[in-house]
Image (spheres, helix red, strand yellow):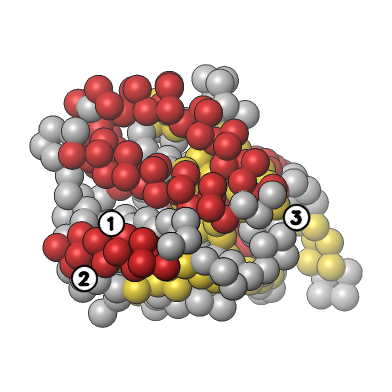
Amino acid sequence: MAAPEGQWVLMATGRSPTNIAVIKYWGKRDEALILPVNDSISVTLDPDHLSATTTVAVSPSFPSDRMWLNGKEISLSGGRFQSCLREIRKRACEFEDEKKGIKIKKEDWENLHVHIASYNNFPTAAGLASSAAGFACLVFTLGKLMNVKEDYGELSSIARQGSGSACRSLFGGFVKWCMGKKDDGSDSLAVQLADETHWNDLVIIIAVVSSKQKETSSTSGMRDSVVTSPLLQYRAQTVVPSRVLKMEEAIKNRDFDSFAKLTCADSNQFHAVCLDTSPPIFYMNDTSHRIISLVEKWNHSQGTPQVFFLLFLNICCLLSSQYLCVLPGFAILP
Ligand SMILES: Nc1ncnc2c1ncn2[C@@H]1O[C@H](COP(=O)(O)OP(=O)(O)OP(=O)(O)O)[C@@H](O)[C@H]1O
Ligand SMILES: C[C@@](O)(CCOP(=O)(O)OP(=O)(O)O)CC(=O)O
């Protein structure tokens, strides 16, 4: 089937924020489909601060698919980009704009190429989950362009194939990535637990404690953990299931004390799994450790059960009107 002809260009633009996990995803049961070994829960950040903005265009005059990231052309040959493009194209629907004289039949989309331009308003591939915002945005915007009718849950399972954590960025507020049981991954998708208005006095601040790039990427780090860490299996099978239930309850009740305690515990166990990996993975540095100690002391001196947690090289601080808590972050800002 030949693609439609003409000089027209059809475009769509979208924006997606990044997210920070409070119950961590660490380990895949299927590398190609990006299926996790446990459920995870995250908080989606405000898009004004950390987000990807993506414009996708389609035209009969484009001879191939191309992509520019932060103004520089990048290859689309990687399996993750191809999976997202393929899955969206499969679900594309007929589109017509009579005024502009554009008519694209469902089957035409297979033969039309896209140009994609995306910008992150924070450092890319520096440990701040740009892949989460980026792939969520790519899938969302391609879906808009190609008139895809699927709901956000279905789109999240496509974004998951770009980067696991990306599936959670399709929703605002508090989001759960259900690991799913099926081999084809069709039930491994994100659901919103509570929207962004649910817990208004929760504020996230990102503090930078190192300007160095992470030595181990999440993708390769978790691959090593799956193969070598006995603690990972115990965590996934025994610890996370009940922790997820408690976290859902804490979010529902806006119970900050439980929320922070669970988040700290999960962050600490995540770091323990990293240390239990061979070779061991170190995401925290001396400054991180000093901040943990300082915050612990501060907590005790207040005499109230305030809890903090910290992860990776950077820290995100969670602030509510009553509480302060340090949240995990990967950020490495220049
Ligand atoms: N806006 C974007 N649109 C599409 N893909 C993006 C975008 N931003 C980043 N990516 C993809 O994500 C890759 C970076 O992912 P990587 O996991 O290395 O870093 P990160 O997500 O910033 O950090 P981490 O996962 O460690 O928190 C980029 O090389 C690119 O393939
Ligand atoms: C520690 C984490 O931030 C790991 C994120 O890993 P990625 O989603 O970046 O990994 P891939 O699926 O291989 O792309 C925990 C989390 O976000 O849940």
Circle nearer the N terminus (2, 1): 2
Relative to residue 306, is residue 287 drawn left or right? Answer: left
Q: Earlier in the sequence, mark 3 or mark 2?
A: 3
Label 2 SS: loop
Question: Closer to us: mark 3 or mark 1?
Answer: 1
Decide: few, some or many residues near mark 1? Use Cα within 10 Å; few <14, some 14-19, many ≥20: many
Q: Position of residue 27 (x, y in %)?
A: 36, 33
What SS does tag 1 mark? Answer: loop
The CA span between labels 3 and 2 is 43 Å
CA distance for labels 3 and 1: 39 Å
Residue 121 appears in the figure: yes
Q: Which sits earlier in the primary sequence, circle 3 or circle 1?
A: 3
**Pair 3/2: label in front:** 2
In the rendered image, residue 6, in percent from the top left (x then y), is placed at 69, 69
Where residue 195 appears, x then y in whole percent?
71, 57
Q: Residue 210's mark?
A: 2
